[in-house]
Structures are given as C-alpha cells and as structure tokens.
Image: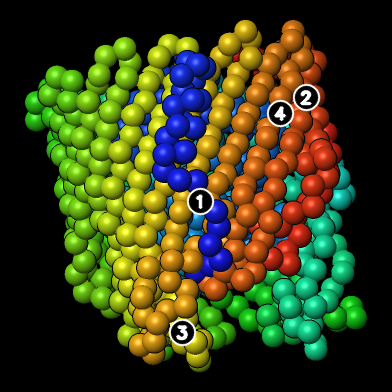
Amino acid sequence: MQHRLPVFPSLHVLAFAIALVLPSMARAEIAADATDLDEIVVTGTRTDVAIEDSLMPAQVIDREEIERTQARSLPELLKGRAGLNITNQGGPGKLTSIFLRGAESDHVLVLVDGIRIGSATAGLASFQDLPVDQIERIEIIRGPRSSLYGSEAIGGVIQIFTRKGGMGFEPHFRIGAGSNNLREASAGFSNRGERGWISAEGAYQETDGINACRGAGFPVFQGCFADEPDQDGYRNVSLSLRGGVDVTDDVTVEGHFLNADADNEYDGSIFGGNETETTQRVLGSKLTWTPGERFKLTAQAGRTADKSDAYFRDAGVRSYVNTFDTQRDTASLQADFAFADGQLLTAGGDWQRDEVTSTTEFLVNERDNTGVFVEYQGRFGAHQLQASVRNDDNEQFGNHTTGSVGWGMSLGNDFRLNASYGTGFKAPTFNDLYFPFGGNPDLKPEESKSFNLGIGQYAANWTWTFNVFQTRIDALTGYDSFFNLVQIDEARIRGAELTFATTFAGWDLSTQLSYADPRARAHLTAEGADNPNYDNLLPRRAPRTGRIDLDRSFGAFRFGTTLNGASARYDDAANTVRVAGYGTVDLRLEYAVNADWTLQARATNVFDRDYETIAWYNQPGREYGLSLRYRPAR
C-alpha cells in the first residue's frame, strides 16, 4: 500500500486516448504485422479464436517479432507491453515479477504449451529462467480467466509456446556476444512431413552481469541487507523437444519437453545464500480426436518441476543453504461441440497435484485440485456472446465457483465494441500456509470481481483498441504490524489501456500505453485500528507505463528503436519509499548478408539511464550486442 502518486484523472485519460486515435495511425495489440488480422489465440477461451473476435483484451508476440526486437530475455521482451508492470532484482537471471493489470504478482497464470507452471511455494513463475530462444509465440490475455483455468488467473493469463517449425526440414543457428562479457549460442531444427513432425532446440547464455544490489549489511541493514559490490553473473543452458504424428485423419498425438538449468549469482547472506542452481522443466503430451467438423476431444497430461538449490560463497568457500523443489502433475480432458453454425459448447475437467520437497519442513507438502468447467460461445448476426462457469474442488479449501460473461458487437467500418465481467480466485501457496514462523494455515483463497469495456478498429492497414477496466479483490493476503500473514486487505484497481499500430510510408509503428490505479481499500488493520495505508497505492506498480516500437527496412538493412517508460512507484505499503520513474531508448540494426544469413547489432539503454524497478536493486546501464543468425530462406 503506498504514497499517493498523482493520478491521471479519468477525463484526461479519455481525452488522451481520443487524441491518439483520431489520426487513424493505429493498429492494435497484435505484435505482428499490421495486415495480420487472422491471428489466432487459444488462451482466452481454450479454443481457436481470431484475435479481433476475442472478447478479452489479447496480444500475440510471434517469433518474427522476437527476432526483430533482439530481446535477450523474456522479461526484456515483455517490458512495457499493455497492462504489464515488471520488476527485477538486479539484471539478467535475477528474480523477476509481473503485475498484470495492477493485480498481485502471483495473480497471473502462466502456461507453457498448455501446461501450468510455477512454484507451489513462492507462487510465482520464473520468467527470468525461461529462455527466449526456445519460444515460438506468446499469448497475453488481460483480465480474469479463473472460470476456465481456476486459481491464479485474476489479472490474466500468459501462455508461452515453444518452437515447432514449419513444413520440410528447417535448421537454424545463432551466435552472439555483448557487454558484460555476454556470450550466447542457440541452434535447432524442425522437420515436418505429411504425417509427422519433430523439432529440437538447444540454447546457451552466460553473462558476468552487473552489481545486483546497492544495499548494505550490518549495522545499516538496507536493500538486500548485504554489501557485495561485485558483478553478479548468470548462466542458462536449455533444451526443448517437440514432436507429433497424425495417427489417422482423425487422431493426432504429440509431446513436448522443455528443460532450463540456470546458475545465478546475487547479493545475499549466509541465511539466504548468494548463489542458486535452478531447474525449470515442463513435460507434456496431448491427444486430439476430431471425428468431424463439429466435434473435437482433447486429452492432455503434464509434469512440471521448479527446483532451486541455494548456496553461500564467501572468501572462495561455497556452503550449501537450502533446497525448494516443487513438482506439479496435471491432466485435462476437453470436449468442443459445435451444435449449430456459430454456436460452440465446450466442457471439460482439470486435475492438478502439487508436491513440495524441501529442506524446510512444511506441515502439509502436497495437495490435489479438481476443476470442471463449461463454456458457451455464440454468434447472432453482429453480436457475439461468451459465458463460462467453473467449480474447483481443492483438497485444502473445498469448493470454489467462478464465472464470466462477455458480449461483443460489430459496429461497421471494422469497429468492434465489447464488454465482459468475470470473477477470479487465488489459492494460498504452501509458503503462505505453512512456512515456519511466518505461514498462516487459516488463510482462505483471495477473490476478485472484474469488469472490462473496450472498443477497437481492425482495419486493413491499422488496428487500435481502447479498454477500461475495474477489479476489486477481497481477502488479500498481507502482513499485519507484527509481520503475521492475515487477510483483511482489500484492493480496488481501475485502469485503461490504449494500443495502436500501423504501417505507413514503409515504417512499422506499434504503441502501447497503460494506466492503472491499484489502491488499498481496507479501512481497518488486523488489530481493528484505522488503517494508515487506506487508499495508498499498492507496492511496486507504476501507474503509467508505455512502449513504442518503430521499425523500417532499407534494402538489405533494417533499423528499429524501442522506447520504454514507467512513472514513479512506491516500494512499500506505507508509500514512504519512492522509486523514481524512468525512460529508456533501445536501438537495433540488422543486415541481411544474403537470403540465409543475418547480422544483428543492438544498443540498449543508449542514454545510460540510471534507474531501478525495486528500491536498492540496480538495472543495466548502456549495453551493446552483436549476433549472427542463420535461417535458410523458404
């Protein structure tokens, strides 16, 4: 909960949005080309939907854009995207949190190839350890999806798809180097025939990093409570495999595997360590039966692992500190039935089992959850409807029901209006419940209610969208004045997002502007006194963020720039620790040596802006990079 930031008044937000939309230089949140209006998303409904027909605000980042931006990490790729606030504890490989639409960092559901990932202890996905070279595309759904996925999807859903490849044999290769002794390489291939396909990817990345934290230890104890002014390095080695076969014309079987092992250095102490060895692993399989155009049955199963071993290194001696190891097994069955033209009914069930193995003893270290859901999607002329309901039966918390409803209307001239309402919930993590001397086994799930109203235009040469939303969250988990976990907090989040992009005079322009006002709304403390943090801003969320991407090709050359900015935020609930806003400029250049080989160069934070996203934790200054990419022309 935090110092009150000056807020954009609602009228100013609307006026600003209209002023930007009027010039007609727009294209929306699709991060691909302006004419690519047939982009399909599956995350928002668990079925194939054209992005312009999505009743929830959606964005797609495809492989082409990943390569064009030259982003070297997933957090760097997502930075500044509509609705996203990102914090990082000191550079590459350091703990990175994403706040989606002003909700908590553990209120975003993360999927990899349809499999739920994340730590059952910390409640977070390790975005910093998911290698960007292994990613084919990313779908971002803004708004609650608990009615389809269950716990965590209060702020929205981010789904990552690993690389799959196209028809025929297609190898690729990349090698790169950069500032802070960055060295990296990746290679892979895909091969698709008439019935089957296979792909394999390997990637390596290592950097000496930056000094992660400018804190101090005894007797000051500030920041990370450690004084280690050194470079904190990071190393990541990853492998992914995908394959499948059309057994018959009706039956398809496929499987996928992703493993990322990382070594990370940070500033810490003998109690929490200053080095970690982590593993992120996703293993999944899927069977699809499509006996006709009107029916489809999908069965999916997976296992994920989130493991971290901590060590403390001092004077060249390395000692073991602790281990946290989460294993998650999931299975789902989903049936889609198109019972009439423009009418689709989906029903299914999910099963999940979490198990924790740790050097820290938990009173309970495993639990099951079973969810069943049903969804309807229908079209009636210019109108579109979507409704879903889900019940989750959790071994610890019993039954919890969530729902959502959405409506859309085509207004002519490629304009669309949509409105949606949904509820969400978040089950407490094992740390919340049972961590020694800090957990509270009496915690219940957090609950939310959200509303979204949006308008947009999906034209041939541009797209723009404008969305306003409000979310109320009850039973928020937080600490009282004695540092006990309690659930008396409430939050009200209001915001707006404007996205547009276009191609004009040979330039590709994409802009994303976000505003969120996340405020604490609990009047009383756990002790029954007046809450001094009432109406404060929630910690670590910048109310205003923005991103502009501008690219153009000149023969064999392509030039691009990205402008990223965020307003000031507060690092604490009392709003006394202010983290200044910032703006950065990145430049990129690529040269097509021939149809197969491309040379890329980049300069990030070119004005060497000194900034933080979390108090006391540094962010990289000016950095340079050079890479050579091979991909045969098709």
Mark closer to the chain start, 2 or 3 = 3
Mark 1 in CB contact with mark 4 (< 8 angstroms):
no
One can see residue 323 in this view? yes
Q: Would you identify the image quadrant in which residue 240 lies?
A: top right
What residue did someone put label 2 on? 589
- The Cα–Cα distance between marks 4 and 3, rounded to whole angstroms, is 45 Å
Q: Is residue 436 left or right of residue 91?
A: left
Amino acid type of the residue that numbered disc 4 sits on in the rendered structure: Thr
- The Cα–Cα distance between marks 3 and 1, rounded to whole angstroms, is 27 Å
- The Cα–Cα distance between marks 2 and 3, rounded to whole angstroms, is 51 Å
What residue did someone put label 3 on? 480
Label 2, residues with CA under 10 Å away: few <14, some 14-19, many ≥20: many
- The Cα–Cα distance between marks 1 and 4, rounded to whole angstroms, is 29 Å
* Percent x, y of residue 192: 49, 25
Amino acid type of the residue that numbered disc 3 sits on in the rendered structure: Asp
Tell which tag, 1 or 4, sits nearer the viewer.
1
Tell which tag, 2 or 4, sits nearer the viewer.
4
Tell which tag, 1 or 2, sits nearer the viewer.
1
Mark closer to the chain start, 2 or 4 = 4
Seen in the picture, residue 486 relative to 516 is either above or below; the reply is below
What residue did someone put label 1 on? 7
SS for dot 2: strand
Mark closer to the chain start, 3 or 1 = 1
One can see residue 286 in this view? no
* Percent x, y of residue 275: 74, 71
In the picture as drawn, the residue positioned furthest to the left comes out as 340
Q: Would you identify the image quadrant in which residue 553 lies?
A: top right
